[in-house]
Image (cartoon, grey):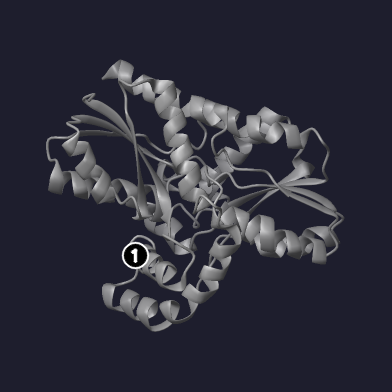
């Protein structure tokens, strides 16, 4: 077995769309202190006293609507990406796959790396943008398990790749056939986050969501600013695709009630845009590299229904990168750079 390997880590999924499996998954996911970043007692009360009493049943129905014969679409596609990247890299560089929540767990896969004699690993979080509730929690969890199981394992982490030229090229390769067919508007829908997370990630505590037009004002805070990085991805894609300013906009999906979240909200845009004359819409979700519940059910399902009900005519969610050859090429190129330096 090779001494060097790649570890892809994605979000994860329930083992099935049954209510008990969804409840177990949500308990792990929302119990993460970087997702619900409340003091432990408050987090427990909110999770056990409110969320897990009602949400598992609703979420189970949503998962069931996107479940495939192969199981979770996110897991099945992530496994396909793992296989395709392994084929591209060759037998000398094995590729492992773990999920931050659910199975295969990070703990299980680190154990397998140790058993296989891997000494160096390239950790590749499958998140283009930094957020403490996505990229950061993956890195922290991996390093916790490395410290516990394999303290001599050398880990190199791929940083957020939100404006990497090959990532943008992969986004364009997936979107170009749809852009060529004609449309009124392209909506970039990114996963939402609480405004509080932007301020918390700003080490200066004086820029994000504080300075006017903060995302367009150069600052070291952008290195850990999810919102600024989403706008950077949008700018890079728009330049690559040659889009006119009037042809696109940005919104944020998947919010919880109770505090300010990033705006504008995607679901509200689906209601507003038809009234503004947008009848034929394309939607991209660049925060996700793999189609999942948030893209297949929330956007292509409920989002489409909302847009059509508001007066829209045609609606298309452009697929995520998934196993597109351009994405596999991007992953392979980043891996090869590491192999060449190692």
Q: Quadrant of the N terminus?
A: top left
- Residue 187 seen from this side: yes
Q: Residue at x 49, y 53 (%)?
A: 71
In the image, farthest residue toward the top: 340
Q: Quadrant of the C terminus?
A: top left
Note whether 244 is above or below 71 in the view shown: above
Q: Position of residue 294 (x, y in %)?
A: 56, 57
Secondary structure at badge 1 equals helix
How many tags in the picture? Answer: 1
Q: Position of residue 135 (x, y in %)?
A: 39, 47
Q: Position of residue 326 (x, y in %)?
A: 56, 27
Q: Quadrant of residue 50?
A: bottom left
Residue toward you, 94 or 51: 94
Residue toward you, 5 or 274: 5
Bin the neighbour count of mark 1 within 10 Å (Cα to Cα): few under 14, some 14-19, many 20 and up. Answer: few
Note whether 17 is above or below 241 in the view shown: below
Q: Residue at x 48, y 46 (%)?
A: 76
Q: Quadrant of residue 47?
A: bottom left
In the image, farthest residue toward the front: 69
On screen, residue 107 versus residue 38, left or right, reads: left
Label 1 sits on residue = 28
Q: Position of residue 54 (x, y in %)?
A: 48, 80
- Residue 243 seen from this side: no
Q: Residue at x 27, y 73 (%)?
A: 40
């Amino acid at each position: 077995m090779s001494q060097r390997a790649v570890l892809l880590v994605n979000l994860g999924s329930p083992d099935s769309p049954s209510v008990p499996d969804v409840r177990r998954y949500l308990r792990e996911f929302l119990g993460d202190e970087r997702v619900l970043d409340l003091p432990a007692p408050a987090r427990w009360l909110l999770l056990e006293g409110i969320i897990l009493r009602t949400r598992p049943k609703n979420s189970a129905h949503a998962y069931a609507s996107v479940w495939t014969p192969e199981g979770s679409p996110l897991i099945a596609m992530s496994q396909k990406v793992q296989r395709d990247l392994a084929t591209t890299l060759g037998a000398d560089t094995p590729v492992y796959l773990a999920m931050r929540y659910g199975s295969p767990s990070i703990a299980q896969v680190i154990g397998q790396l140790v058993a296989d004699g891997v000494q160096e690993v390239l950790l590749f979080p499958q998140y283009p943008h930094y957020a403490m509730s996505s990229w950061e929690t993956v890195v922290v969890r991996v390093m916790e398990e490395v410290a516990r199981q394999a303290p001599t394992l050398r880990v190199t982490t791929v940083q957020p790749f939100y404006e990497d030229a090959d990532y943008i090229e992969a986004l364009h390769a997936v979107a170009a056939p749809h852009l060529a067919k004609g449309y009124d508007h392209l909506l970039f829908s990114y996963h939402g986050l609480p405004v509080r997370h932007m301020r918390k990630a700003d080490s200066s505590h004086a820029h994000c969501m504080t300075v006017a037009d903060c995302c367009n004002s150069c600052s070291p805070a952008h290195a850990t600013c999810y919102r600024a990085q989403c706008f950077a991805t949008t700018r890079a894609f728009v330049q690559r695709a040659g889009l006119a300013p009037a042809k696109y906009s940005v919104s944020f999906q998947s919010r919880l009630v109770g505090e300010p979240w990033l705006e504008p909200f995607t679901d509200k845009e689906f209601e507003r845009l038809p009234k503004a004359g947008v009848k034929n819409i394309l939607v991209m979700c660049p925060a996700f590299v793999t189609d999942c519940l948030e893209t297949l059910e929330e956007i292509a399902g409920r989002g489409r229904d909302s847009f059509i009900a508001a007066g829209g005519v045609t609606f298309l969610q452009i697929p995520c990168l998934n196993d597109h050859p351009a994405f596999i090429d991007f992953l392979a190129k980043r891996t090869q750079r590491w192999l060449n330096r190692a």
